[in-house]
Amino acid sequence: MRRPTARPKRVTTALAGLALAGYALAGCGSGAAGGASQGSFASVPAYVAEPFTHQQHLVAAGARLIVSDGCSACHLEGAPAGLGPNFDSFAGHEVTLANGRRALVDEDVLRASLVDPAAYSLRGYRAAPMVRALARLQLAAHPQAVAELAAFIEQIGPEP
């Protein structure tokens, strides 16, 4: 699992907050399926975007997609229990799949499950809502969005 160098959790939270604030100020987008998110900071002044690394740009774009594509309804703090795993405690953990196998949630598993959620159905969660949501988003046709979502989910996971 590729992880950036150690970073304080508050930096990650600040990056996600900045991305979400930028999204709110820019107005609603159409998400991955509509092609609105390209990971671009075109509406953000250069002096704000310049210090960020490529990975930080991916995380910020992923944060916007989490909100615009509706993922936050089931996967972020405050979501009703049992709808989907909370992203705060997902990446970096071993999970039990519906078929009984165990898997470490790393970047490869995240990317594969975003493209084909049925391949990594989790025990204790209904697969159908995730399969429907991702079919609607057609993430297989949007590899940049997959990279952004995986970067965000991995970044807000537990510290290494």
Image: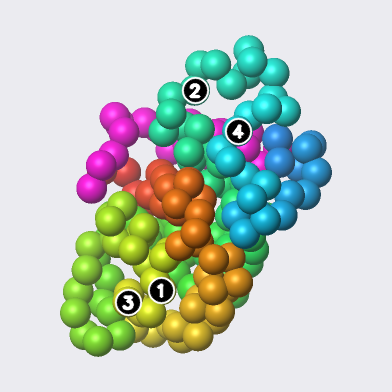
Residue at screen point 36% across, 31% down: 7
- C-alpha gap between disc 2 and disc 1: 31 Å
**Vertical side of 28 occupied by 82: above or below:** below
Do callouts 2 and 3 mark residues in contact (Cβ within 8 Å)? no
Do callouts 4 and 2 mark residues in contact (Cβ within 8 Å)? no
- C-alpha gap between disc 4 and disc 3: 30 Å
Upstream in sequence: badge 2 or badge 1? 2
Quadrant where the image shows the C terminus: top left
Residue at screen point 25% across, 87% down: 99
Q: Within the image, what quadrant is residue 68 found in?
A: bottom right
- Residue indicated by mark 3: 119
- Residue indicated by mark 1: 117
Do callouts 3 and 1 mark residues in contact (Cβ within 8 Å)? yes
For the record, the magenta segment spans 1-21
Neighbour tally class for label 1: few under 14, some 14-19, many 20 plus, Cα within 10 Å: many
Upstream in sequence: badge 2 or badge 3? 2
Residue kind at label 1, given as amino acid type: Pro
Residue kind at label 3, given as amino acid type: Ala
Do callouts 1 and 4 mark residues in contact (Cβ within 8 Å)? no
Residue 10: in sight, yes or no?
no
99 sits to left or right of 77: left
Magenta stretch holds residue 114: no
Neighbour tally class for label 2: few under 14, some 14-19, many 20 plus, Cα within 10 Å: few
- Residue indicated by mark 4: 40
- C-alpha gap between disc 2 and disc 3: 34 Å
Dot 1: what SS?
A: helix
- Residue indicated by mark 2: 52
**Vertical side of 145 occupied by 16: above or below:** above
Q: Residue furthest left?
A: 101
Residue 47: in sight, yes or no?
yes
Neighbour tally class for label 4: few under 14, some 14-19, many 20 plus, Cα within 10 Å: few
